[in-house]
Image (spheres, helix red, strand yellow):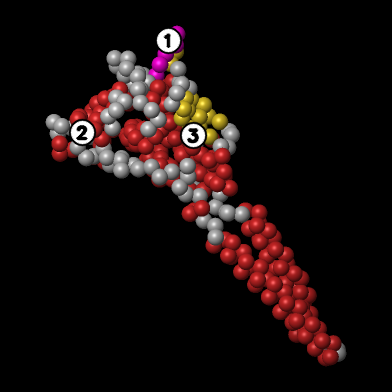
Amino acid sequence: MVSSLRLEIEQAMGLKFPERNGEAIVRFEESMEVPRAAETLMRGLYRDPERVRQGFKLLQQETGSLIDILMPRRSRLREWADSLPDRPKEAESFLKETTEQLLIREQRLVQAERDLVGQLQESGLEDVFPIPLAAFGICTYRDPNVKLFLKPIGRFAEIVQINPESLRQAIRVHFLFLLLLIAGADLDGRVYARGGEDEVIHWLTSVYTFRFLKSQSTELIQCYQEWVKAWGGKMPPQSLFNERACEKTRAAMVFWRRQLNISWEECWHIVNQLEPESSNVMGFN
């Protein structure tokens, strides 16, 4: 993990990664393995890729068989158009025979095409989405660490046709914020005291990630939005990105991290008691 990015993440969230002998401890791994949660994604848009592949192969064969009949027939017809056949009966027999062959081959080709179209209609994005978040990366809360899965990330970029490197960068930022949220210490040294509350954690992570990427590039934001949408996450409202909202978000986040028995909504309500008009902007339901 590039130290400059880590420092930017720490500054943005107002937390610090733990240190050992003056070095930050950032348990952040990028792996080429494919987790079980990513199997459907890696398979892609086809429920049965091999069956579809065989369908194309059969259609190719039937098309070739039809061409094998049509090409010599075309050549013979051109010849007879220039010079009439010597034996009309032989020409008649040839035409009848090739016509019968064409009808049979055409029926087989139409059936092969109909079957293939049916298989293609059964395939699509609805079989892939939503994608489990664990297909892209996992986070362990006890002894906090993160592992990203690069192959599924690349496959997703290919399917939705976005820049894979920009997508990887956006996801790195998301999971680095997530890791800092559960592993970092605040200014007075207090650490995360809660369990694995994935919904709130990823919501807060998305808030900080979106703010961070918003200052980087439009492409990163677009990639991030596509990715969050893919696993069913929710993007934060624009009302969270003014300076006052940022301060209140951090105050509520620090308070929430220290508590075991108070929900995020309660923490946010407490922080907003002095400004009730903005108390609903952080709901994630």
- Residue at 70% from the left image edge and 72% from the top image edge: 108
Secondary structure at numbered mark 3: strand
Position of 104 with respect to 9 (left or right) is: right
Looking at the image, which is closer to me, 153 or 4? Answer: 153
> What is the spatial separation of the Cα atoms under label 3 and label 2, in whole angstroms?
31 Å
Q: Earlier in the sequence, mark 1 or mark 3?
A: 1
**Residue wearing tag 2:** 269
**Callouts 3 and 2 close, C-beta under 8 Å:** no
Nearer mark to the viewer, of 1 and 2: 2
Q: Earlier in the sequence, mark 1 or mark 2?
A: 1
**Residue wearing tag 1:** 22
- Which quadrant is the C terminus positioned in? top left
Whether 103 is drawn above or below 238: the answer is: below
The image shows residue 95 at horizontal and vertical percentages of 77, 84
The question of residue 247 being in magenta is answered with no
Looking at the image, which is closer to me, 246 or 96? Answer: 246
**Residue wearing tag 3:** 137
Extent of the magenta region: 17-21
Nearer mark to the viewer, of 3 and 2: 2
Q: Residues within 10 Å of mark 2 (few under 14, many from 20)?
A: some
> What is the spatial separation of the Cα atoms under label 1 and label 3, in whole angstroms?
28 Å
Nearer mark to the viewer, of 1 and 3: 3
